[in-house]
Image (cartoon, helix red, strand yellow):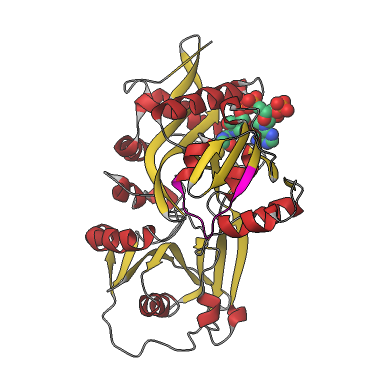
Amino acid sequence: MEMRPATHEEFDDFDRAVLAAFHREVTEEDRRAFRRTDEPERSLAWFDDGRIVAGTSVYTRHVTVPGAIVPCAAVTAVGVMPTHRRRGLLTALMRRQLENIRTAGEPVAALWASEGAIYGRFGYGIAARNASLTARRPVARLAAPPSVADPQRAGPAADHVEHMRAVYERVRGERPGMLDRPGAWWEARLHDPESERKGAQPLQALVVADGYALYAVRPDRDEDGPAGEVKIRELVAATPAARALLWDFLLDQDLTRKVTWSLAAADEPLWLMLTDPDAVRLVLQGSLWVRLVDVPAALRARGYAADPDVVLDVSDAFCPWNAGRYRLAGGACEPTDAEPGLALDASALGAAYLGGTLLTELAAAGRVTELRPGALARASAAFRADVVPWCPEIF
Ligand SMILES: CC(C)(COP(=O)(O)OP(=O)(O)OC[C@H]1O[C@@H](n2cnc3c(N)ncnc32)[C@H](O)[C@@H]1OP(=O)(O)O)[C@@H](O)C(=O)NCCC(=O)NCCS
């Protein structure tokens, strides 16, 4: 068995192996879409007798963190074929990948997990949650519907890319967890193969001056009459007025009975905008996992609500170069011999990094230990972000 990057020419086989792990086949349409954003030189694959049986890759992106935007290795395409699972192939891929990311100089890695039990052991922690949202029509109505007839335009998603890009860029810098979308990433975000529509219309863009929504209506009918569903892929509003206009439109589509969005922000305020807040249900789920690949560089890169002034005792069995004590104070993060105020492992630190998972919550869960009175409250308040982290896309 050999582990190495898959070449450009080998990438069809790479996709086939990774999708086989998900019990799926690659379609021609998928293949074309993947090629726009693939970075074969950042992939890693296991070859068994010349055939790819496991793989993972990285997208070179940036993620917003409190007070900054940092280079981020967006880990993707993790799969081990059913014939080769549970013999350590993933563990070896993860180890080599993190070494490579460190060499590339990216201080953090991030990913979406198919199952929550996989990545904690590799030092990733849940740094963001999303809300799966369901609004019931016709009960879900805005308490203050927009009065101005600000034009709402709706049409094929591809016709509105420049507008959406501009709105997204306005919002991205303020929201931890959002990633940049360089190159073909907007095209990738609009990927809409018929095979995945499940009966819905092609992807639509709804556009207002300071916002947009990507959505599709799936018509349906049952014994009670029209039962369509408005499925939101992404809704981004730079102002409350834009948010009201978007929701006003989406909640008022004829022949529909509900509006759903599986990747809403955990603090999506729709329920506070309705005459009946109970008309919307929000279910919180873990979303973005973050791993600090270079602990001091990552901790220096982000901003803090106040000076944490703390010595952290970090354990990191999987990336031993990170283990040790660091004084985090005054914008610096340096190795130290001083007595620590908090002890935690890499996965807890990754969870706290975007400022959404609090150090106090992690301590209550037994995952952070306070060694000096006052250190926990001070560090937790400093790490906390003003804006709840949100990653609106699965990559
Ligand atoms: C998840 C997956 C990549 C694991 O690969 P693998 O090569 O079998 O993993 P390893 O053999 O290196 O396992 C390392 C450890 O993680 C555990 N583990 C791996 N996958 C796990 C899972 N899905 N749930 C719980 N534990 C898991 C193993 O039991 C093992 O534990 P141990 O060290 O205590 O024995 C593989 O099962 C797979 O491809 N699954 C389907 C696709 C998928 O979910 N990919 C992840 C996308 S985010």
Magenta: main secondary structure equals: loop
- Going 50% across and 84% down the picture, which residue do you hit? 141
- Going 47% across and 38% down the picture, which residue do you hit? 297
Query: Is 168 rendered above or below residue 5?
Result: below
- The reply, left or right, for residue 190 in relation to residue 353 is left
Could you tell me residue 126's position as x and y percent? 60, 48
Question: Which residues, given as a range, are shown in magenta?
Answer: 301-311
Query: Is 284 rendered above or below residue 73?
Result: below
**Number of numbered callouts drawn:** 0
- Going 58% across and 41% down the picture, which residue do you hit? 327
Q: Which of the 4 image quarters holds residue 174?
A: bottom left
Quadrant containing the N terminus in the rendered view: top right
- The reply, left or right, for residue 251 in relation to residue 277 is left
Quadrant containing the C terminus in the rendered view: top left
Q: Which of the 4 image quarters holds residue 242?
A: bottom left
- Going 62% across and 30% down the picture, which residue do you hit? 323
